[in-house]
């Protein structure tokens, strides 16, 4: 099952070379183990310009597959989807 967060949830991300390496969500730290997919989406007529990442992450309770993105207009990071 996939949980799509609308609106997306702001997260605090640690970034190296433009790619997320760790992020904090709901007070928990998630370390990025693998970037499964990366894509850029730009919809100029709607004011959307984002870098998306599908990530395999790990916290103290196990692995979690998520989709996060960086809004290239405001340079903030958001959690979009969580896969169970």
Image (cartoon, rainbow, N blue to C red):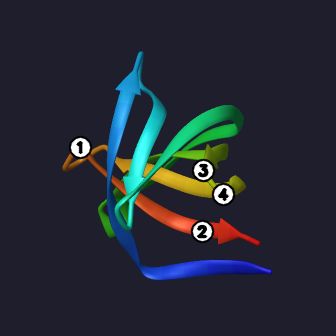
Tell me which residue sits at (46%, 62%) in the image: 79
Q: Which residue is mark 2?
A: 81
Q: CA distance from mark 3 to mark 1?
A: 28 Å
Q: Which residue is mark 4?
A: 61
| Residue 35 at x, y percent in the picture | 67, 34
Q: Are marks 4 and 3 in contact (CB under 8 Å)?
A: yes
Which of the two discs, 2 and 4, sits closer to the camera? 4
Position of residue 83 relative to residue 75, above or below, is below
Q: Are marks 3 and 1 in contact (CB under 8 Å)?
A: no
Q: Could you say whether the residue bearing mark 4 is in a helix, strand or loop?
A: loop
Circle on res. 60: 3
Q: CA distance from mark 3 to mark 2?
A: 20 Å
Which of the two discs, 1 and 4, sits closer to the camera? 4
- Looking at the rendering, which quadrant does residue 6 occupy? bottom left
Left or right of residue 42, residue 35 in this image: right
Q: Which residue is mark 1?
A: 75
Tell me which residue sits at (40%, 19%) in the image: 16
Q: Could you say whether the residue bearing mark 3 is in a helix, strand or loop?
A: loop
Q: Could you say whether the residue bearing mark 2 is in a helix, strand or loop?
A: strand
């Amino acid at each position: 099952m996939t949980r799509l967060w609308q609106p997306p949830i702001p997260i605090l991300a640690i970034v190296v070379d433009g790619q997320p390496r760790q992020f904090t969500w709901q007070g928990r730290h998630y370390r990025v183990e693998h970037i499964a997919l990366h894509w850029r989406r730009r919809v100029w007529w709607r004011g959307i310009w984002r870098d998306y990442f599908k990530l395999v992450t790990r916290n103290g309770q196990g692995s979690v597959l998520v989709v996060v993105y960086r809004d290239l207009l405001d340079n903030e990071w958001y959690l979009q989807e969580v896969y169970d």
